[in-house]
Image (cartoon, grey):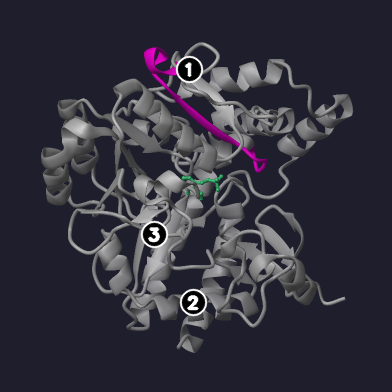
Amino acid sequence: MDIVEEARRVFPGGVNSPARALPHLPRPLTALRAEGPYLYADVGRLTDFCMGFGPLILGHRPKAVLDAVREALENGWLYALLTEVEVELGRKIVEHVPSIDMVRFVNSGTEATMNAIRLARAVTGRDLIVKFDGNFHGSHDYVLVKAGSGAATWGTPTSSGIPGDVVRTVIVVPYNEPEPFMRAMKEHGERVAAVIVEPIAANYGLLVPDRDYVKLLREETARHGSLLIFDEVVTGFRVGLGGAQAFYGVLPDITTLGKVIGGGFPIGAFGGKREYMSLVAPSGPMYNAGTFNAHPISMVAGLATIRELERGDAYRIADSAASLMAEGIEEIAGAKGIDVSVNRAASMFQLFFARGPVRTPEDVRKSNVDRYLSLHSVLVRRGVYLAPSQYETNFTSAAHSEDVVAESLSAIRAALDEVK
Ligand SMILES: Cc1ncc(COP(=O)(O)O)c(C=O)c1O
């Protein structure tokens, strides 16, 4: 049986999530197993810089998580009752994330942002949402809206099947540009329930705003009585225990989490001030429920991950790996006379075939995206798996040692000569 053919017969596009289709490669890759920084696929061993799109901050199959999950499985895996481990993980989140007093666990980042927006609407009694061009918040109706033409616009749907009435509640503005955001808030602010933002944007390459911009979002939302939602599904426990809000020292009203807090198992969470979270069912009128909410295995894996992160070594190694990759790539490309710009934050980095700083989604679109895909496919042949799209981000982990980085940079040095 050809697994790819068979997959195409039973799944739309042959996959269960679009980013796995890899149309620039001869065929989609098939995973066999993984260990530390390595993914073993049908094409052989790959040093992984995708890391499951971000959750695997300790690397693949870290012993601490494996042991904890194995032990938990012995007891059972679904109870539909309160468990001690979910309380422990909840306490860790409240302890570390500065703006969170209370939290609700759900099953994905998508559910987290959907509920965060519903909560903001419940708190404010308003309908409108402001989101940013190039930010990604999952795949529910409220956020599958992209910028239309013009600077600050009513969005257009990114997907078919989204009701016009939903689209008309979403205003899309350019990311990392103060003026259009301020204009949109001036015009619509009194009707805006929430501004939802990736404080560091990891879904359009990697874009790292400066603190003044993030502060501006805080000040403008407060001025208009709108809530500020930080979507920290990627950055939560990734850029440090306190997430991007601690990194910038700017506190949102509601935070969404996912990825790292589940240690590689399905997870999402939203949290914030006690007065807001008290509106969530059953203590209040904003409904959320789920068969798999706070799934015991995700809780165990997340808790084991956070306990490792608290020791500090994992962040040191992962951050240093990303920093060495970013510097190394710029140096290698520079020596070859190729225009490459690399953005980095903590253990995330992305490279762009562009001259000069890449600050906004518009800058990303102007970079040579085809060249990135060419590099990606050459590197797969050379045993390195970068994030499979220019619009994704590379992640390092505690398993990305200096040797692993050096080996990957050699592959990149050779690959850049082959790139079209
Ligand atoms: C910032 C952000 N928010 C939300 C989501 C959605 O999370 P999930 O894929 O768990 O539904 C993602 C997924 O990549 C994300 O990057």
Mark toward the start of the polypeptide (2 vs 3): 3
The residue located at (72%, 35%) in the rendering is: 64
Q: Are marks 2 and 3 in contact (CB under 8 Å)?
A: no
Q: Nearer the viewer, residue 161 or 1?
A: 161
Task: Look at the numbered disc 1 and give the secondary structure of its residue.
Answer: strand
Magenta stretch, residue numbers: 263-277
Q: Position of residue 257 (x, y in %)?
A: 49, 35
Task: Give the vertical position of 27 relative to 60 (above or below).
Answer: below
Q: Nearer the viewer, residue 248 or 183?
A: 183
- The residue wearing badge 1 is 102
On the question of residue 352 being in view, the answer is yes
Amino acid tagged 3: Tyr
The Cα–Cα distance between marks 2 and 1, rounded to whole angstroms, is 42 Å
Mark toward the start of the polypeptide (2 vs 1): 1
Task: Look at the numbered disc 3 and give the secondary structure of its residue.
Answer: loop
Q: For residue 108, which quarter of the picture? A: top right
The Cα–Cα distance between marks 3 and 1, rounded to whole angstroms, is 30 Å
Q: Is residue 266 covered in magenta?
A: yes
Image check: 380 left or right of 141? Answer: right
Task: Give the vertical position of 407 relative to 83 (above or below).
Answer: below
The residue located at (52%, 64%) in the rendering is: 387
Q: Is residue 236 covered in magenta?
A: no
Q: Which quadrant: the C terminus?
A: bottom left
Q: Position of residue 96 (x, y in %)?
A: 47, 23
**Which label number is shown at residue 373?**
2
- The residue wearing badge 3 is 204
Amino acid tagged 2: Leu
Image check: 273 left or right of 36? Answer: left
